[in-house]
Image: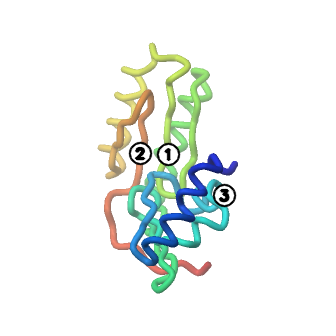
Amino acid sequence: MLVDQRLLDRLDTLAERFPGRVAIISGRSIAQLDEMLGRHAQLFAVAGSHGAERRTPEGGHVAAERPASLEAAADALRAFADANGLVYEAKSLGAGLHYRMSPAFEPDAVRLAEDLAAAHGLTLQRGKMMVELRTPATRARPCAN
């Protein structure tokens, strides 16, 4: 899924006007940003997964490791989503639970995410009609790819 062509045109303009001085920062993974932005993701320094992974032309791609505790918490979020008709979103260094289509589940979703974050040492990030569990800020390591 590519983003709107107008945004891509603006990114081209930024790359021309400010070479080496623009970064794209997102809660999405770098892999998702690459899919969404195509060749444009290669023009800039990119920080994904809330800063847990980064890529620069000079430094390459660095990312924190996905801890086993995140897998356990992600399994619990996925099970809750499946049982209640909610949307589970897998992320490189996180897991999201969206309740936009069923807002009555907000209290239960938030409580579950709070409990899982505390039990597994994860960071809870609230968004618009969603909760996300992610790895806490850690030192990133170079990636093989």
Amino acid found under the numbered disc labelled 2: Leu
Q: Return the x and y of residue 142 as percentages of the image width and height.
A: 48, 80
Q: Are marks 1 and 3 in contact (CB under 8 Å)?
A: no
80 is higher (above) or lower (below) than 8: above
Q: Return the x and y of residue 36 as percentages of the image width and height.
A: 63, 54
Which numbered disc, 1 or 2, marks the residue that appears first in the sequence? 1
Q: CA distance from mark 1 to mark 2?
A: 5 Å
Foreground label between 3 and 2 = 3
Amino acid found under the numbered disc labelled 1: Ala
141 is higher (above) or lower (below) than 131: below
> Which SS class for mark 1?
strand
Q: CA distance from mark 3 to mark 2?
A: 23 Å
Tell which of 48 and 69 is nearer to you.
48
Residue lying at 35% horizontally and 42% vertically, measured from the top left = 125
Q: Return the x and y of residue 12 as percentages of the image width and height.
A: 57, 65
Quarter-wise, where is residue 135 in the image?
bottom left
Q: Which mark is residue 35?
A: 3
Tell which of 42 and 140 is nearer to you.
42
Q: Which residue is mark 1?
A: 95
Q: Return the x and y of residue 7 as percentages of the image width and height.
A: 56, 51
Which numbered disc, 1 or 3, marks the residue that appears first in the sequence? 3
Q: Are marks 1 and 2 in contact (CB under 8 Å)?
A: yes
Residue lying at 45% horizontally and 52% vertically, measured from the top left = 27
Q: Residue furthest bottom?
A: 58
Q: Which residue is mark 2?
A: 133
Residue lying at 44% horizontally and 78% vertically, measured from the top left = 20
- Colour logic: rainbow
Where the C terminus falls, by quadrant?
Answer: bottom right
Q: CA distance from mark 1 to mark 3?
A: 19 Å
